[in-house]
Image (tube, rainbow, N blue to C red):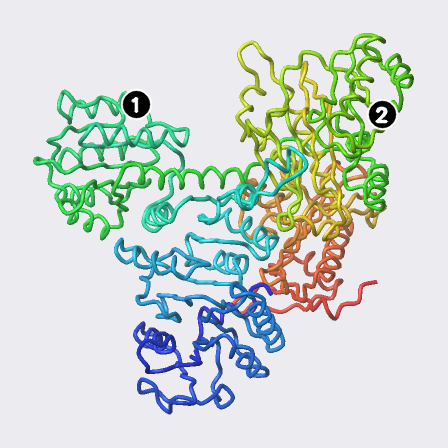
Amino acid sequence: MGLWNLERMFEPRGIAVVGASERDGSIGTAVLRNLINSGFAGRILPINPKYRRVFGRAAWPSLDQVAEPIDLMVLATPLAAAPAIIRSCAGREVGGAIILAAGGREAGPDGAKLEQSIAHEARIAGVRVIGPNCLGVIRPKIGLNASFATQTAQPGRLAFISQSGAICTAILDLSLREGIGFSHFVSVGSMLDVDFGDLIDFLGNDPEVQSILLYMEQLTNHRKFMSAARAVARLKPIIALKAGRSTAGARAAASHTGAMAGEDAFYDAAFERAGIVRVNTIGELFDTAALLANQPRPNGPALAVITNAGGPGVMAADALAEFGAEPAPLPEPVLTQLDALLPACWSRGNPIDLLGDASPERYAAALEVCGTAHAFDGVLVILTPQSMTDPSAVAEALVKQMSGRRFPVIAAWMGAASVAAGVERLNQAGIPTYPTPEQAVRAFMHMVEYASKSKLLREIPTERALAPTFDRPQAAALIQGAVSRAAWTMSELEAKAVLAAYGLPVVRTVRAGNEQEAMDQAADLGFPLVMKVLSPDITHKTDVNGVRLGLRGEIAVRQAFREIQADLRRYRPEARSEGVMLQAMVEHPECELLLGAVQDPQFGPVVVFGSGGTLTEIIRDRALALPPLNRLLARRLIDQTRIAPALRGYRNRPSAGLDRLEEMIVRLSQLLIDFPEISELDMNPILLKDGQAHVVDARILVAEPARPAPFHLIISPYPEEQEMRAVSKDGVPLWVRPIRPEDAALLADLFTTLSPTSIYYRFFSPIKSLSDTMLARFTQIDYDREIALVALEDTEPDGKMLAVARVIAEPDGERAEFAVLVGDPWHGRGIGAILLDRCLRIARERGVRRIWGTVLKENTQMLALAKKLRFRISKVPGSEDCELEMDLSQVKFE
């Protein structure tokens, strides 16, 4: 349902508490007390037929008798009462309800039916629902504590969303001890309606929210979550703790690819694609939150470690090594300065060991040097309790040195009672403290990971998009033929034909039904050869000794045919034989790889890449990614594997042709986009030799698709159906299509054709060039929530870019902002009108109701276009600028 009414739930003026009570121990009592004691300034309306007054406030017997408007309703009642209560909201314009009670789907089939009834009534009444089975909502800044928590949160800029109420209370308790504040503290429970995607969208657009923390057990709307997370993670860190890393979610599969993939790995792939940092424990989540709440984000992993003992410094170095990092080297100027300030026997390296008699002044001096060196991205200060070191005095010295630092300073005060006062002083000053160096380093490196991921989200592909050289009709005939005859495992010959139709480098493979055919085919193919059993009942050919390698003559071919048939009868006498397959042998390969995919009911198709061969499942060197994939994403997928360094070239071994591997991954991605019928796909092994890849074995499993393309994907693919040809007013042929990530260079070239006036009209500021960040933002769009069409010269897909128009939907999907940019040489040719008209049509098809935009009063060309397209034009209040608006539901396109 998008973000509709969420602003009323999180900034309510009137709150009704249904089930409000004065009875000790009741949830209704706890909620009402929390609202009153937290200082909520709006109306609090107790609802309970048993009371006339509750805590001195007038009570109503039912919602029907409340005349005042209600933005938020908290149900402190048994769950069975919820449908009727929600039903009573019809016609009252209640914003939303928080349902606290358990007893829904987690209680079994009857509870699931009850939830369905609640959802039905909520849709009719137009009421948003948080819960059921949740703790409630806290928003400290406005004194909103609509929960039954025993404490309330302090104000801050962190937002916390949790499926578990118990985790909420634990984090809340820890935050109060450490002085961490929150902008929003939300327990979502069963997510009957409002879910992670809704809240990430809502909080991502709130300037008061600096970072978002998630405790997640499962997703309900995977595509909405990915769309929201990918948009927000570019701007704000999202840190997630996903429970359930066990193998229970892994699925048994007929292919190597399926056997290597499991549900938790799919979450990893989704988080990676969205730019979300995943932590493994509640402790890590909280430790990272402590750093996020009070310190600037690091730009890189260069960490200086200051300590008064050698052992903890080593522990910090070991913790960095777990992340593939090490303490930053000390530049010569830093060494010189420290030599002048520290005892002669200091460590003269990083970790910077100040020795056991380190004074507050010595700590402060070392921090001062590191803080002004510009060689570090952060400083970790470690203190162990020693007789000559005063933890409180050192803490005070750190606080004084912290003012104006450009990078995070974190502390590990090791010990208990003897360091407690120092820890408290640091927490008061906003310096996060950790009991061990390892915890401090992990929190720091999680922030480094976010910095790295945010840069990757803004990275620009350097290559053009893959040329569309796919034979879709050929692949469709094979795949749909297999589905129609319920042949769920395609033969290897069929599988290779499908892959060849998409340009994947399969080794030519032929069938021989009998011994003589095998001899004839061998003579045609040439030697050496590989012979494999052909049976619809055999998945892994080596299980029946069904592969013979290195056949170099007719005698070897004849003998291999007889042996394969005999072994099939010996190992699987019930299996059907359709003869054998023959293919040329790739001798002495340099490497064996796996490339495949598995279809998940929730995540859709997932691409798997890694080391291949018969030991694939034992070695388990693999990385996963979600389509759609371009070359840049394909290269990242390769780089995540342990075999990647060897593929880039190792010792006397040349590079393995990474460009070709990238292209294979992109082609496989397109195949998976086009055919939701593919449930599993295996290319294993792919043999690399002399920079060429050879798919020597392939397997495809198909099934009736649960959803048609492209809705089987959780990331919207390039909308090819929006491509069209057009002609400008003066007869120039145009190629109109959606923008692609690979268009960054074309967009940059278009910008160079703009006059300063045109730039100001479009961007409302005199910018000189489009930064890489801006280019990434404008070209790497979410096709689910944004429409961006470009007009290219002639009919060439990659010709000169002449113009771009875009419609950016607000998170609720009902309103959207438009913008048009036409290069100066092509003004007055009607190109902008063509693009915007097409954008508006697409927007209406997607359910957008209103389009708006702001135009400077001097931009007469844009205002003329707006009049032509029948926008309503009005003045922006308090400004001379114009606001354009259109009700798409009332527009009749020609």
* Secondary element type, mark 2: loop
Q: In front: mark 1 or mark 2?
A: 2
Distance (Cα) linking label 1 and label 2? 70 Å
Residue 672 in the image: above or below residue 286? above
Residue 314 in the image: above or below residue 554? below
* Marks 1 and 2, the one that precedes in the sequence: 1
Give the label on residue 247, or none: none
Taking depth in this image into account, of 775 and 723 the one nearest to the observer is 723
* Secondary element type, mark 1: loop
**Mark 1: few/some/many CA within 10 Å (<14, 14-19, 20+):** few
Residue at the left extreme?
387
Residue 273: quarter of image:
top right
Q: In this rendering, does residue 469 appear at all?
A: no
Residue 553: quarter of image:
top right
Q: Is residue 115 left or right of residue 531?
A: left
Residue type marked 2: Gly
Residue 465 in the image: above or below residue 651? below
- What residue appears at the point 26 percent right and 46 percent down from the top-left corner? 431
- What residue appears at the point 69 percent right and 39 percent down from the top-left corner? 680
Residue type marked 1: Pro
- Quarter placement of the N terminus: bottom right
Image location (x, y in percent) of residue 738? 71, 46
Give the label on residue 579, or none: 2
Label tally: 2
Residue with the mark numbered 1? 331
- What residue appears at the point 60 percent right and 47 percent down from the top-left corner? 759
Residue 243 in the image: above or below residue 752? below
- Quarter placement of the C terminus: bottom right
Q: Is residue 544 left or right of residue 284?
A: right
